Every structure is written in C-alpha cells, then in structure tokens.
Image (cartoon, helix red, strand yellow):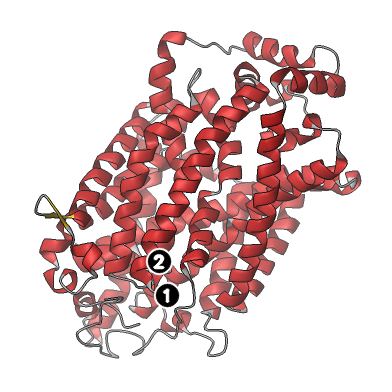
Amino acid sequence: MEAVKPTKVSRAFFVRDATGLVRELSWFDTFLCGFGILNVALGLVQAFAYAPFVFPGSNIALAFIIALPGAFFIGLLNALFTAAMPRSGGDYVWVSRTMHPAVGFAVNFFATFGVVAAAAVNIWFMAQNFLVPALYVFGLKGASAWAAKPESAFILGAVAVIILVVIFSLGLNVVRRVMLGLFIITGIGTLLWLLTMLVGNNASFVARFNTAMGAGAYQKIIQTAQEAGRTVNPATAGRNSFYALIYAFQMYGGFQMIGYFSGEIKRVSRSAIQAIMVALGVGALFFIIGAQIIVRYFGYDFISSVAYLANTAPDKLDLPLGYYLSSFIIYMTSNPLLKMIVSLGFLATIVWILLPQMLIITRNMFAWSFDRLIPSWIAEVNEKTHSPINATIISGILIYIMLLVTLLTAFWSYLVNLAGVGAAVGSLVAISAIIFPYRRKDIFEKAPSIVKKLVFNVPILTWAGIFTLITQLVTAFVAFTTPSIGGAVSMVSLLSSLAVFVLAFPIYLIPFMVNKRQGLDTSLAYKELPPE
C-alpha cells in the first residue's frame, strides 16, 4: 500500500479537498534532495574549519564513524514515518497526529526556522567563501575582490533569492533538472579535488604552498598558532574524537529530511527508504575516506592551525582567498583547468544545497496553511506548474530577511545553544515514533508493511524511535557540556534558543481560537491525515 487514505475529508478542516501538489519526484530526485543537504564537499570543508579547533587532536574520520549508527536510526525513523504518513510537512504531520497539534507545529516551526537560517548562512558563505575563489581562478580578480567585500553579500544574496524564487515558481520539473545539473558539476569537481589529494602527498603540498606564500610559510602557520595558544593534549584525543561527533551529525544532517515534501514523491514508501539510505551510505563513505585523505595531504597540524587562527586570530592568517580548504586548490596544482573545475564544483555545491532547503521551507508553510494555521492563500497552487507560488515568494523573503539579520546584527551570538535545543526538540519526534504504533493504531494499521514490521514483537518504527532518542540525548549532552561548541550555557543563551520553539505555541493558539469562535474546531483535522 503506497499511501494512507484519510477516513474523512472536510472542507471545514482543510483548505480544500486536494492539495494540488503532484507526486512527480522519483527516488533519484528524492536522493538528490537528501544528498544535496548532506552535501559531502561542503560538509568536509566545514568540519575541518571548526572541529579541529573546538576539539584539538580529534580524529574527524573516527567522529564520522562514531556518529554513523545514530545517523542510521534517524534516517530509518524518517523513512518509516514518511512511508506511514506521506504528506507535506513531515514531522509537523507526524507529531501533530501522534502527540498534539501544538507540539507538532512547534517542532516543525523550530525545524523550519533552522532551515531558513541555514539557507541564509549558505548564501552568505556562497558569496564570501565559494564565489570569491571561483572568480579568482577564472582570472576575474577584480570581481573576486568585489565579491569578497562584506557589503557585496547584500547584492549577491538578493540575486540568489530571486533566482531561487523563479526556479521554484516554474515547478518541480525545473527544480529537478537544475538539481541534476548541479549534482553533476559538484560530483566532477569533488572527485577531482579528492583525486588531486590522493595522488599527491603532504610534501608536494608543502612545496607548492611555500612557493606561493613564501619560504617556510607552511611551518610558520603552525608556529603562529602555537604562539597564539594552540595546544594538543594526546591524552584527550580519544575523548575529543567522541565529542566531535556533534560536528559529524551536523554534516550528516539533511539526508533524512525528505519527509517535508513527501506529498510529491512517487511510490513514496519504497522511494523514501531507497533515497535516505543511499544518501547516508554514499555520504558516510565519502566523509570517512575524504577526512583521511585531507589529513594525509594537508597534514593535521597545518589544518588544525588554520582552523585555530581562523577562529581566534584571523588577522594572523594572511591567506588571499580565506581559510576554507575549498580555496586551497590554488596551492594544490598548477593546472588552470583543474583549478577552474574544482572551484566551480565547490560553487555548485553551495548552490545545490539551497534548492532542497527552499523545497522544505515552502512545503512546511504549505502544510501549515492547508491546516488553516496561517492564511489559506499561502496554500494556493498554480494549476500549470503545481507550485505553491505564494509560499515560494514568502520563503524567499524570509530567507533574505534572515540574511540581513545575519549580516547586520549579532543575532547568532544569542543562539549559541541552538544545537543542544535542536537535539532536545528532535527528541519529541523520536518519542512520537515510539508511541505512534500504539497511540494511532488507525493510521498505523493502514501503513505499508515495512512500517508494521516487528522486531522482537515490537514495531521497527518504535525501535528506530528508541535509538534516535538515545542519539538525540547524547548529542544534547555534548552540546550543553562543551561550551566551546557555541558558547557558555547561560540563562540568556538558553532562553534565546528556546524562544524559537516556544514562540510557536502562541502562533498556533491564535488562529485556533479565532477559528473556534467562528464555530470551526480545527483540532478535529488532526484526527486524520490531510488529503493528497
């Protein structure tokens, strides 16, 4: 059975009798979405930009291995829940139908805020860290220098958001084609980047780096970091490798998020499991092997010193194209074509991640509107493109506003405990999976057979929820007990991060009360699944 049919559909509960969305995403399209957010190239670069600084001496490849079982159960939970309730909104639908609609909305609101924020930051990173080196190696040094200016992000961000809105307004068929093109460009660039390191060695990199930056420049960076306070205690290397799993989880994160747009996936019960598990398997392989290749080629002391100086004393790190390893291609080869392909691949990967993020934001807003939590016109769908145009435009505006907030304020300094709170909020989804087969037997019994499979006489979804809950609690523990991840845990930082979750409750209650005064009890909608 591919989908659960609602037992009763009422126009009073939902905006209309059918969503207007069409199931046109194949399992491979779905894989591209999940794999695009997991994003191996970007994940490796960001992991080495922060993890060696926060957790000195940590083995990043080992951290990816330690985090893999937890990521597997998170993926399994999302695949099974997607198969059981394949509707736009993902955990909004799952938790609202299992625990309580207000809790479901709060969980999804928090997740959506996180994706909006991530999209804004990715646009900023795209302008500052990936477009700059790409322009540079293409010989456009004037344009590269302009793009490197902080104020250029305002213009480049606006252009990026407009392009995103246009692409999504044209429908998923166009989105699919753009994602495929970006996947191919990214894949070629990433493979060539890894192969360049694999066939080379540390001595060749040191020689090229010193030729470009001056005699002894490689060792000078290591020495400067030591003088600035960088130390590594071998006795803490094992512990730090374990703690670094929080970065591994962040890099793995996203492969499981297909539930948010599951209302548009064909043969969803099969496609969800295929896409999620293939994305995780391929991603884990590249993360683990790629991390080892990076350390072998650049040298751990060097990349750790670069990360340390970038985070504590950037004025002492005089690198022309920034400190991300993606820009180090200028030191890795003298072949101009290879430099161009690799740099273009990194630029493509940061653009690629924006597409599934935009898809998630628009479909979550669509789901809220369809259940009458926000104005119904937001759920309007273009009959020709099957695209929720209004939700798309609003999503673009929200992303750009978040970009402005990021560029102009100290907003992120108040949300230093967001990772820990995110893990705590994710625990609610895990609890929903644990109790779903027992609390919502009416929906569970209509789910595909894979969802109802028993292991030791307990549903596999319940097991996935139990192990996901353990994973989230461990992640929260690391986040809250390791202040260097985001900053010291304080009442201000904790409340600031919690505010995103708590704010959702009045947002839910206001339209609920308004509808109830008009004689419409929208809570009844949560007793069944939305129509397709």
**Dot 1 and dot 2 residues touching (CB under 8 Å):** yes
Disc 1: which residue: 266
Residue 110 or 6: which is nearer the viewer? 6
- In percent of the image, x 54 and y 67: which residue is there? 395
Quadrant position of the N terminus in the picture = bottom left
User: x, y percentage for residue 350?
Assistant: 64, 51
Circle 1 — which element? loop
- In percent of the image, x 33 and y 40: which residue is there? 69
Q: Is residue 431 visible in the rendered structure shown here?
A: yes
Horizontal arrangement in the rendering, residue 186 relative to residue 277 (left or right): right
The image quarter containing residue 52 is: top right
Q: CA distance from mark 1 to mark 2?
A: 7 Å
**Depicted 430 relative to depicted 112: above or below:** above
- In percent of the image, x 75 and y 45: which residue is there? 343
Circle 2 — which element? helix
User: x, y percentage for residue 446?
Assistant: 19, 74
Between discs 1 and 2, the one toward the N terminus: 1
Q: Is residue 487 visible in the rendered structure shown here?
A: no
Callout 2 amino acid:
Ser
Disc 2: which residue: 271
